[in-house]
Each structure stands twice: as structure tokens, then as C-alpha cells.
Image: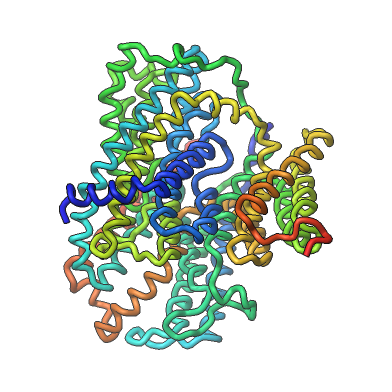
């Protein structure tokens, strides 16, 4: 099936009333949680997961995906108005967005970020539609050894490219893999690490894990944080229109941001946050007058927003075509797909083309809806931002508790969230990244299965990972990444010691 | 509001973190070795993957903790009161849901959680509890149709 046929099939899928409804619901909720600081796409998707059990898989994924890329639109609103990022990837937008609003140009900033987000998303979708089938073709040649090697590369990339020490990142990945082994081993029927608790025989509930690690830790860290700035000015239509100079200054940054975003989004281990940061840094380097940045330069707002939206779309490339999640949210999305009985990977395109193409077309429709939601309705989001966090977070906690309960109608899951929340907060305090843990958890069972099969086929010969060419390629990349990051960490440590000696 | 971080002789974060990882890892490996069939590489048993992962985690934990012994760091800052209120509110909710019903469990949970924010007035806390309880009933019980006892006397 070529791209044109696929898009036509997808259009027929995505234009069905139910699909449109769930698409709208997804992008609406996505914008809402993107606007609100303290609750993000991760927590929301895991909360909505149990809700999706009762609707058809395509609608479910359309909605969850809508939450994901919708959040990238809303995130910039709080950054611009309150100097507080609504999503991690909008943190960079604070740098020039907040100064712009202090200069009375909040409306323009909001308009341009929405437009940049739209451009980034649409171009990202084009890349997704173009590349995913091609990559899936290559993926069809993969055997268990290749899959294992590729997942290994994904995990090592996630742990080394994330901020913080690579050793700590690796430890998180391994802990995630270990937590993934809890439950009944599919191969032998042996219950692992259940300690006699029947609920643990199905493994750790992914919703409880995501909520505890990300939701609870986030809430505990955010309470009692001082909130800067009050929203005083009303945003009128006229105040939103950018000047011709603004347009001229923004076109190239938007396109560059899209390129950077598409690249980092598709790469496993990196996502929207790194993409937006890189886009900002690039614009600052390329600018004729870099001193404008940090004081309300419009490029500093449009480039990162285009980047994080493009990244959100292209993140689906490895997830759908190879079954390898690029970041923690994609890992959760992958988990959602598996729960719905869909096996992402190269066969997805041939077995369920209506799901794949319907999803892609729904991205386009969703982005159009988001343009409408974010431009004329921006006043609504601004009003919501006026709700103080002190009232919001108890509601978030109860929603987390009820959402987790709804998975199995078992209060045990709420206790799980509490326990994992403790662990999540401990990890956050001790400066461990939770995202690699999530990736390890989702990929763990898959990796074990592929490792087992690969070793079975090779009769216990571990050399198989190096003998097969594609697998060898992945392994070499793993080795290179490990060496590069360890060398980088070593250099940092030596430099720190030099500085300590000098002082 | 943030105090200047106090310097310490050892990097407490990584020392504690590495130790935690090492304990978790070695404990997991030891448990797997004792309870599950390890098998051979050619024929992996249920214990194979967890055992080696546990060992790897333990080694990584040691690798994190050792350099932390000689590297200076800062005091670990923990928001104990907030943590207690947040975790406590979850546990309270879980314990109260079935016996007391959705509305009372939500209200109690919100009140406990709100204690984390010292600056909140008691009136705000009570209003928030009532509003959120009503909201939860609307969203979860009515709109989503979840099977939940609403009051202590509900079935």
C-alpha cells in the first residue's frame, strides 16, 4: 500500500464521528493539562488508560495521542504568562516568552507559539507518514537477536542521553527491567517476586507505576513552591496579531525548529524536551544579535515550540514502525497499545493499516482542532490558570487514586501508587531520572522474550549478537554510546577535581 | 524560600542512591538464585534474567556509591511534611473508600492532602474538600459509571 492509498484509508477511518469525538476529547484534555503546571501528559495518559478499555482500540489510541501532542500546545501558555512551564518541554519558552508578556506582547507570543506548534506538528506528520512505512520495511527483516540489540540500544540511549550521570541512568533502566520481571513469567508459568500477594501475580500495574513515579513525585515537589506573577492583562484579539516583522523573523526559526524536533523526536532516548532546548540553542547561535535572547526575542519562542510539537509527532515513528518507544510517554503509549491487543512493529502496517493510517490522519485533524482551541479560546485557558495550585493538587491526588482504582476495582492498586510514590519521590530527591525506569519496565518483558528466543535459536551461543550484521550494527552503536558517555563523565569528574584543587 | 544548600564532605545523594540500588539489586539477585530456576543460556529459566539484572544493578549501585565517598556534595533536602500528607492522603483514601463511601473518603483525603500547604485557610480547605468530592462523584460515579459506594450506608 503506498502513501496515497494509506492516507485515503486513514481519512475514511478518522472522519468517523466516534473517532472525531475521541480526537477532540484527547486534544482538549491535552491542552488543559498542558496549560496546568504540575500535571502532565504522563499522568493524564495513565489516568485515561483504564477509561479506554471500554472503547475500540483505534479510538483509544487517537485520544491518548491527542492528549500527548495537545499538551505540547498548551504548555507554552503557562510559560509565557506565569514563567512556569506547563510541560517540561515548554521550560525553554519561559526564557523569551515571559519577557514578551512583561512587554505587553503576551498575545503575540501566544499566537505565534500556537502557529509554530501547528507548523511543527504538520511537518512532523508528513515525516511520520513518509518514514514510518520505510522503516517498517527494514524492520521486517529483524529476528529476535536484532530486536534485542535494538531495544538495548534504545535503553542505553535513554539512560546516557538523559540529563545526569549515565551510570545513574543505566541503574534506572536496570531497575525498570527488574520491576518488569515481577509477575508471572510467560514462558514457565513461574510467579516471580510476588511474595505471596495474589495481585502481584499479574505484575506491577503500569498505571500505578506511572502515577507513582511521575504524578506523586511531581505533586510532592510542587506543593509550597512560590508561584511567580499574576495574570493581569486581558488578552484581546487585536493584541494577538503579530507584526510583519514578527512573521519575517519567525519563518526560518520555525522551519529549523521543525527539523531539529523531527530528528530528536524520532531518536530513541530523546524527545520533545531536548528538541526544544536544542532549537533554542541553535537560534541563539545563528542569530545576528544573540543578546536579544532572554529579553523577548520571538525566535526564542517560535523555534522551541515548533521543535517540541514536531518531536511529539515523529516520536511515533519508532514506536509504531519498530515497537521501540523513544521516551517514557511513548513507552506508556506502547503499553496502552499492547493492552488493547495491538502489537506495534513492522507487522502493524500490514496487519492493521486502518489503525496506522487512521492514527496519522487523526493527528492532522487533531492539530487543526488545536489551532481552533488555542487561538480564539485562549481566554478560557488563561482563566483556568488563575486556579491556585493549592486547590488543584488535592484534586489531582484523588483523581490519581480513583483512576488507578478503576483499572481492577481493587484498592490494592491505590496502596501500590502510595508505595511507588514513596520510591518515586526518593528517586527524585536522590536525583535519579524516572523516565529510563519507565522505558526499562515496558521493554523488560519484550527484551527477555527476544533474548530467550535468540539464545534458543543460536543454541546458547552469545556470539549471535555480533555475527548477524544488523544486530552487530546496533551493538556497535551501544558500545560507542557507552564509551562516549563514560568518557564524558570521566572528563567532568577530572575537571571538577581540577577546580577543587585550584580553589 | 530556598536556603543555600549546605556543603557536605561526601556526596550524600549518590552515596545513599548508590547504596539503595546496590541493596535492591543484590537482594533481587539473591532471591532469584534461591527461589527460581536459573537454567542455562541456551535454555533460560525464569530466574535467569532477574538474577543477572539484579547483579548488574548491584554493581552499578556500588559504582555510583564509591566515587560519592570522596566527592563533596550538599545536604539532602526532603519535604517530609508534604510527603507525609500526600502519601497519607492516598492511604487514607484507599482505606476509607469501601467502608465510608466515595464522598467521605474524598473529603477526608483532600483535607489531609491540604495540610501540606501551610498557608491555606481552613475555610478554603473545607470548601475545596466539598467541591472536589462533588466533582469526583459527578465524573467517576455519574459520568464514567464506576461501581463505587457513594455513602457509608450504600451497598
Say if A487 sits above or below A411 in the image. above
Nearest the viewer among A459 and A41 is A41
Q: Position of residue A440 (x, y in %)?
A: 44, 62
Say if A251 sits above or below B54 in the image. above
Nearest the viewer among A38 and A74 is A74
For image coordinates 59% across by 77% down, the residue present is A194
For image coordinates 39% across by 74% down, the residue present is A448
Q: Position of residue A136 (x, y in %)?
A: 22, 59
Q: Position of residue A356 (x, y in %)?
A: 30, 55
In the picture, measured across the screen, residue A3 lies left or right of residue B48, that is: left
On the question of residue A403 being in view, the answer is yes
On the question of residue B10 being in view, the answer is no
Q: Quadrant of the N terminus of chain A?
A: bottom left
Nearest the viewer among A338 and B54 is A338
In the picture, measured across the screen, residue A478 lies left or right of residue A168, that is: left
For image coordinates 80% across by 52% down, the residue present is B104
Q: Position of residue A375 (x, y in %)?
A: 44, 25
For image coordinates 76% across by 62% down, the residue present is B95
Say if A469 sits above or below A26 in the image. below
Nearest the viewer among A435 and A414 is A414
Amino acid at each position: 500500500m503506498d502513501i496515497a492509498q494509506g492516507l485515503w484509508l486513514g481519512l475514511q477511518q478518522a472522519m468517523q464521528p466516534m473517532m472525531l469525538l475521541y480526537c477532540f476529547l484527547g486534544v482538549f484534555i491535552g491542552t488543559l493539562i498542558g496549560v496546568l503546571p504540575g500535571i502532565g501528559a504522563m499522568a493524564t495518559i495513565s489516568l485515561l488508560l483504564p477509561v479506554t478499555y471500554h472503547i475500540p482500540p483505534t479510538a483509544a489510541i487517537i485520544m491518548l495521542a491527542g492528549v500527548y501532542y495537545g499538551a505540547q500546545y498548551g504548555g507554552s501558555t503557562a510559560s509565557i504568562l506565569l514563567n512556569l512551564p506547563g510541560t517540561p518541554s515548554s521550560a525553554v519558552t519561559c526564557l523569551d516568552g515571559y519577557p514578551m508578556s512583561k512587554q505587553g506582547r503576551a498575545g503575540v507570543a501566544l499566537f505565534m507559539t500556537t502557529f509554530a506548534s501547528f507548523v511543527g506538528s504538520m511537518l512532523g506528520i508528513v515525516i511520520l507518514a513518509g518514514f514510518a512505512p520505510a522503516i517498517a520495511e527494514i524492520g521486517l527483516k529483524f529476528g529476535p537477536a536484532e530486536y534485542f540489540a535494538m531495544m538495548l540500544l534504545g535503553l542505553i540511549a535513554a539512560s546516557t542521553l538523559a540529563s545526569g550521570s549515565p551510570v545513574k541512568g543505566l541503574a534506572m533502566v536496570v531497575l525498570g527491567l527488574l520491576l518488569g520481571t515481577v509477575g508471572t513469567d510467560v514462558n514457565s508459568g513461574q510467579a516471580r517476586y510476588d511474595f505471596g500477594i495474589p495481585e502481584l501475580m499479574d505484575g506491577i500495574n503500569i498505571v500505578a507505576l506511572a502515577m507513582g513515579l511521575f504524578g506523586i513525585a511531581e505533586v510532592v515537589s510542587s506543593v509550597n513552591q512560590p508561584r511567580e506573577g499574576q495574570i493581569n492583562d486581558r488578552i484581546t484579539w487585536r493584541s494577538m496579531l503579530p507584526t510583519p516583522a514578527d512573521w519575517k523573523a519567525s519563518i526560518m526559526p520555525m522551519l529549523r525548529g521543525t527539523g531539529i524536533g523531527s530528528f530528536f523526536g524520532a531518536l530513541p532516548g530523546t524527545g520533545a524536551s531536548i528538541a526544544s532546548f536544542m532549537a533554542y540553542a541553535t537560534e541563539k547561535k545563528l542569530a545576528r544579535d544573540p543578546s536579544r535572547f532572554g529579553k523577548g526575542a520571538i525566535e526564542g519562542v517560535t523555534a522551541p515550540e515548533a521543535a517540541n510539537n514536531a518531536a511529539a509527532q515523529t516520536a511515533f515513528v519508532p514506536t509504531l514502525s519498530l515497537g521501540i518507544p523513544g521516551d517514557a510517554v511513548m513507552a506508556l503509549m506502547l503499553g496502552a497499545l499492547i493492552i488493547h491487543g495491538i502489537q506495534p512493529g513492522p507487522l502493524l502496517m500490514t496487519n492493521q493499516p486502518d489503525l496506522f493510517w487512521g492514527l496519522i490522519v487523526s493527528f492532522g485533524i487533531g492539530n487543526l482542532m488545536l489551532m481552533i482551541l488555542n487561538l480564539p479560546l485562549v481566554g478560557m485557558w488563561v482563566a483556568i490558570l488563575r486556579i491556585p495550585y493549592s486547590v488543584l493538587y488535592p484534586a489531582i491526588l484523588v483523581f490519581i487514586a480513583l483512576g488507578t482504582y478503576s483499572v481492577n476495582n481493587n484498592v490494592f492498586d491505590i496502596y501500590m501508587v502510595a508505595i511507588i510514590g514513596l520510591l518515586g519521590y526518593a528517586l527524585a530527591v536522590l536525583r535519579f531520572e524516572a523516565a529510563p525506569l519507565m522505558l526499562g519496565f515496558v521493554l523488560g518483558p519484550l527484551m527477555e522474550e527476544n533474548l530467550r528466543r535468540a539464545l534458543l535459536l543460536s543454541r546458547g551461543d552469545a556470539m549471535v549478537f555480533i555475527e548477524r550484521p544488523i544486530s552487530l550494527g546496533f551493538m556497535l552503536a551501544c558500545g560507542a554510546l557507552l564509551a562516549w558517555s563514560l568518557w564524558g563523565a570521566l572528563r567532568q569528574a577530572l575537571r571538577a577535581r581540577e577546580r577543587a584543587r585550584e580553589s | 524560600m530556598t536556603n543555600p544548600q549546605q556543603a557536605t564532605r561526601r556526596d550524600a545523594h549518590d552515596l545513599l542512591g548508590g547504596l539503595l540500588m546496590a541493596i535492591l539489586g543484590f537482594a533481587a539477585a539473591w532471591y532469584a538464585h534461591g527461589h527460581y530456576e536459573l537454567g542455562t543460556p541456551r535454555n533460560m529459566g525464569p530466574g535467569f534474567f532477574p538474577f543477572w539484572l539484579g547483579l548488574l544493578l548491584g554493581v552499578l549501585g556500588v559504582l555510583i556509591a564509591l566515587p560519592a565517598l570522596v566527592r563533596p556534595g550538599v545536604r539532602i533536602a526532603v519535604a517530609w511534611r508534604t510527603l507525609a500528607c500526600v502519601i497519607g492522603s492516598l492511604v487514607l483514601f484507599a482505606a476509607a473508600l469501601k467502608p465510608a463511601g466515595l464522598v467521605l473518603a474524598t473529603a477526608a483525603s483532600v483535607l489531609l492532602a491540604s495540610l501540606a500547604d501551610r498557608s491555606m485557610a481552613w475555610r478554603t480547605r473545607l470548601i475545596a474538600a466539598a467541591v472536589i468530592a462533588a466533582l469526583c462523584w459527578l465524573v467517576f460515579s455519574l459520568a464514567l459509571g464506576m461501581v463505587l459506594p457513594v455513602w457509608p450506608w450504600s451497598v
